[in-house]
Image (cartoon, helix red, strand yellow):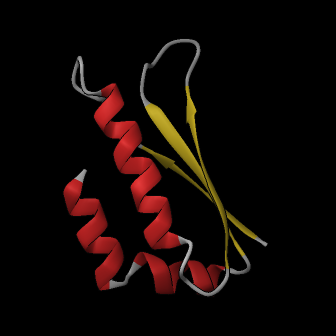
């Protein structure tokens, strides 16, 4: 298993709901990739107020195929 932690930049005030909607939508894109296991959103409870995501894939190779794909680039551009 390969696990990747993604830290998002701070979300603009009042945009949490839109960000969470984007995150849920983007999961529908990413789950179609071979090797995808899960992607969960987490939020810091102390210090920084950013969101992060825990991404699980079968291997680093399957993660990189997803990460470097056009579909991922288009989904990321929407955030």
Q: Position of residue 60 (x, y in %)?
A: 64, 79
Q: Position of residue 29 (x, y in %)?
A: 43, 71
In the figure, is residue 61 to the left or right of 74? Answer: right
Q: Is residue 38 visible?
A: yes
Q: Nearer the viewer, residue 30 or 50?
A: 30
Residue placed furthest toward the top = 46
Task: Please identify the quarter of the rendering in which residue 14 is found.
Answer: top left
In the figure, is residue 34 to the left or right of 23? Answer: right
Q: For the point 34% across and 29% down, which residue is it?
A: 17
Q: For the point 38% across and 81% down, which residue is it?
A: 68
Q: For the point 34% across and 27% down, which residue is it?
A: 16
Q: Position of residue 77 (x, y in %)?
A: 20, 61
Q: Is residue 10 visible?
A: no
Number of marks drawn: 0
Q: Quadrant of the N terminus?
A: bottom right
Q: Nearer the viewer, residue 50 or 19?
A: 19
Residue placed furthest toward the right = 1
Task: Please identify the quarter of the rendering in which residue 21 is found.
Answer: top left
When the figure is inspected, residue 50 is found, relative to residue 58, above or below; the finding is above
Q: For the point 36% across and 84% down, which residue is it?
A: 69
């Amino acid at each position: 298993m390969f696990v990747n932690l993604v830290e998002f930049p701070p979300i603009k005030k009042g945009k949490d709901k839109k960000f969470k909607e984007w995150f849920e939508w983007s999961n529908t894109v990413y789950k179609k990739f071979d090797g995808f296991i899960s992607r969960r959103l987490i939020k810091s409870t102390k210090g920084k107020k950013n969101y992060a995501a825990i991404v699980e894939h079968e291997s680093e190779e399957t993660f990189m195929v997803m990460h470097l794909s056009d579909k991922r680039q288009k989904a990321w551009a929407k955030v």
